[in-house]
């Protein structure tokens, strides 16, 4: 280390001042920053005076427009800042759809008031309240997407979803739990609406609900539809759990006794796992539709769930969507009740931080598959095949070489779930499914170290099963996670998690698979579960052979970084026109891969990218490869034990 005398340091400072002095004379002629924009009032944990009345009209099915009217009480004249929710729980990102807000007018006593959007905080609207005014009226429209090119469709001729954050402004300067709102909803004639909110009156097609904090309102969306059916998933219980289902057509609401039994078993298996619940009632807001956008979004006393229209009617053909309800239900415990301290925010316009999303989403992803198997929504084999698909995907996630799992917790802000050109290299929200593999690793390790006496089930009960009946969020940090793991099974859990969160591979963290009694292999035949997943995405998955996935009309939807297709110069968006001189068909391409196995002749593709056609030759000769698990003889089948129902 170089050192110098104090006098020398002073000389350096003097010299620097002398050197920069000539520039000071020219500073006035150079651009300088303008005055900063005044900050939006910070939220304080004090009650907002009065109750906001919010009326939402969701009857414009022709244009898919939601219209809202708010009456907001004000205590005094002067500046008022109203906020459109920006940071959305469950999205973990600043994705409030303000681009679809339109027709905003603010008035008082029938006279318009001028508003001005904040030029920096564009989700904030400033208005001056005149003297003598006790309330301002706000009218706005939410122009929901009319096609998937604009976003997720939330209104069709036969059903709709209302997310209250899209149709309301709320006053700045207060925690969202301190702003009370009395909401009402008008739905089209013939529609039935479901929500976790408690109705106090219904007049015609308009339902008025009990006043709730704005925080609770945003956490309590509504689902409405023309073809509606309600299933009680815990008959006779003091705390109801309801499956509210809407469908494109009435025949899609028909269920079998076995299907209903599996959904009821989900509730019981969750109670046995967690040993508590954190709601006074729970509603699955479940849409079966090929028109309404699919969704899986957690809330404390409900969840927004959406799958294809044939969920019940093609039950045996579509297992790949049946972990959705267990996943979102688990979030009532993990994410809504127990919540990472840096993801909890006092309002919807304070940035969230996702450092613990590998617990919030990773462990929820894990329990989603486990509970699906334990309840009978998935067979054991289907669950094994689903986990094998995850293991293979992350074993080929070459981006692990440069980007650690921990850094993917920033992806909701970086990419906001946009499609990526090179998913395997860029990575995207891998805290979900690589996180799932980490928790499988932890579960099998606890079982091994304890001689089968303890498991991650014990962690779930100790961590998520506290304060039975409470639905006040209980925050935690990494130290709390580590400490709870150590109460279940003493071990260096801090080191365990650090290695898996900061490690770089190569390959996926598959110790849990091996310890669970299985190994990942590849065969030339897809599992039935993989076929279901492929059909759900309307794609052809050749990731583990040619290194590509094909969507509609032969267009590539993904190319594996550094795989055979990548090395041939193919990218996402390229269209395969012909295979070995014949017009493209997915089955013909699979035949070409089979025929090339063990040979020397390349697979020849005619491809189109924008207006350019070219022929590429892929030198690949290992045949079709699809992942599955194989039992390791003589090893304990811990994974089988994990997937078995709790008694």
Image: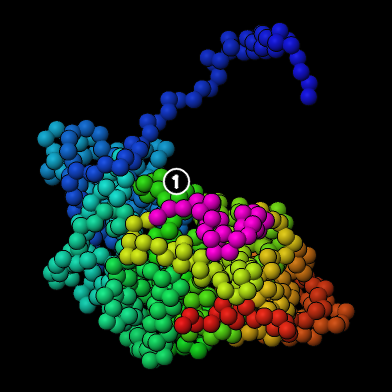
Compare residues 219 and 622 and report the one nearer the observer: 219
Which picture quadrant has residue 575? Answer: bottom right
- Residue at x 26%, y 38% (from the top left corner): 80
Residue 489 among magenta residues: yes
Asked if residue 150 can be seen in this view, the reply is no
- Residue at numbered disc 1: 351
Residue 521 among magenta residues: no
Disc 1 packing (10 Å; few <14; some 14–19; many ≥20): some
Tell me where residue 65 appears, x and y as whole percent.
Answer: 30, 62
Q: Which residues are magenta?
A: 474-500
Tell me where residue 622 appears, x and y as whole percent.
Answer: 80, 79
Residue at the farthest bottom position: 257
Which picture quadrant has residue 55? Answer: bottom left
The number of numbered badges drawn on the structure is 1
- Residue at x 51%, y 22% (from the top left corner): 32
Tell me where residue 464 appears, x and y as whole percent.
Answer: 44, 63
User: Is 352 placed above or below 190 here?
Assistant: above
User: Is 260 placed above or below 149 here?
Assistant: below
Callout 1: SS? loop
Q: In screen coordinates, is 249 left or right of 296?
A: left
Which quarter of the image is occupied by the N terminus?
top right
- Residue at x 16%, y 66% (from the top left corner): 200
């Amino acid at each position: 280390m170089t050192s110098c005398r104090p006098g020398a340091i002073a000389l350096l400072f003097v010299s620097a001042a002398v050197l920069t002095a000539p520039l000071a004379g020219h500073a006035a002629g150079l651009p300088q920053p303008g005055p900063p924009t005044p900050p939006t009032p910070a939220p304080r944990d004090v009650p907002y005076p009065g109750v906001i009345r919010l009326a939402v009209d969701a009857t414009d099915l022709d244009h898919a427009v939601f219209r809202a009217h708010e009456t907001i009480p004000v205590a005094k004249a002067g500046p008022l800042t109203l906020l459109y929710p920006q940071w959305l729980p469950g999205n973990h990102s600043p994705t409030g759809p303000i681009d679809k807000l339109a027709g905003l007018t603010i008035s008082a006593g029938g006279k318009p008031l001028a508003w001005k959007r904040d030029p920096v905080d564009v989700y904030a609207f400033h208005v001056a309240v005149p003297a003598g005014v006790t309330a301002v009226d706000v009218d706005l429209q939410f122009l929901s997407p009319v096609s998937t090119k604009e976003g997720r469709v939330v209104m069709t001729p036969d059903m709709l979803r209302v997310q209250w954050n899209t149709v309301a402004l709320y006053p700045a300067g207060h925690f969202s739990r301190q702003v009370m709102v009395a909401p009402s909803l008008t739905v089209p004639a013939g529609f039935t609406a479901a929500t976790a909110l408690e109705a106090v009156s219904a007049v015609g097609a308009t339902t008025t609900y009990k006043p709730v904090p704005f925080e609770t309102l945003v956490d309590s969306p509504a689902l409405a539809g023309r073809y509606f059916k309600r299933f009680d998933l815990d008959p006779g219980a003091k705390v109801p759990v309801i499956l509210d289902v809407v469908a494109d057509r009435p025949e899609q609401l028909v269920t079998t006794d076995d299907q209903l039994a599996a959904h009821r078993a989900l509730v019981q298996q969750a109670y046995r796992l967690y040993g508590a619940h954190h709601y006074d009632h729970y509603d699955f807001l479940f849409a079966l539709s090929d028109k309404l956008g699919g969704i899986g979004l957690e809330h404390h006393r409900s969840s927004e769930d959406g799958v294809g229209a044939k969920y019940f009617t093609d039950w045996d053909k579509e297992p790949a969507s049946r972990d959705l309800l267990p996943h979102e239900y688990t979030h009532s415990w993990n994410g809504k009740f127990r919540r990472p301290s840096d993801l909890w925010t006092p309002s919807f316009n304070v940035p969230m931080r996702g450092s613990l999303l590998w617990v919030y989403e990773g462990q929820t992803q894990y329990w989603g598959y486990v509970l699906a198997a334990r309840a009978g929504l998935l067979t054991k084999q289907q669950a094994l095949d689903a986990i094998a698909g995850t293991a293979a995907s992350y074993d080929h996630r070459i981006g692990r070489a440069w980007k650690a799992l921990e850094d993917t917790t920033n992806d909701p802000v970086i990419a906001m779930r946009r499609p990526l050109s090179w998913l395997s290299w860029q990575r995207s929200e891998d805290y979900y499914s690589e996180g799932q593999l980490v928790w499988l690793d932890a579960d099998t390790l606890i079982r091994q170290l304890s001689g089968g006496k303890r498991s991650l089930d014990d962690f779930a009960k100790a961590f998520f099963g506290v304060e039975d009946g409470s639905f006040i969020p209980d925050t935690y940090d990494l130290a709390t996670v580590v400490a709870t793991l150590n109460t279940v099974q003493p071990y260096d859990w801090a080191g365990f998690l650090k290695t898996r969160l900061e490690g770089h591979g190569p390959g996926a963290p598959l110790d849990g698979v091996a310890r669970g009694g299985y190994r990942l292999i590849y065969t030339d035949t897809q599992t039935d579960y993989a076929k279901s997943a492929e059909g759900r995405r309307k794609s052809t998955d050749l990731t583990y052979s040619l290194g590509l996935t094909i969507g509609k009309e032969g267009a590539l939807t993904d190319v594996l970084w550094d795989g055979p297709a990548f090395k041939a110069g193919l990218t996402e968006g390229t269209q395969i026109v012909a295979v070995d001189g014949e017009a493209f068909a997915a089955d013909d391409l699979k035949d070409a891969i089979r025929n090339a196995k063990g040979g020397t002749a390349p697979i020849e593709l005619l491809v189109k990218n924008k207006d350019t056609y070219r022929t590429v030759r892929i030198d690949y000769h290992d045949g079709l490869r699809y992942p599955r698990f194989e039992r390791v003889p003589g090893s304990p089948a811990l994974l089988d034990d994990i997937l078995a129902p709790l008694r």
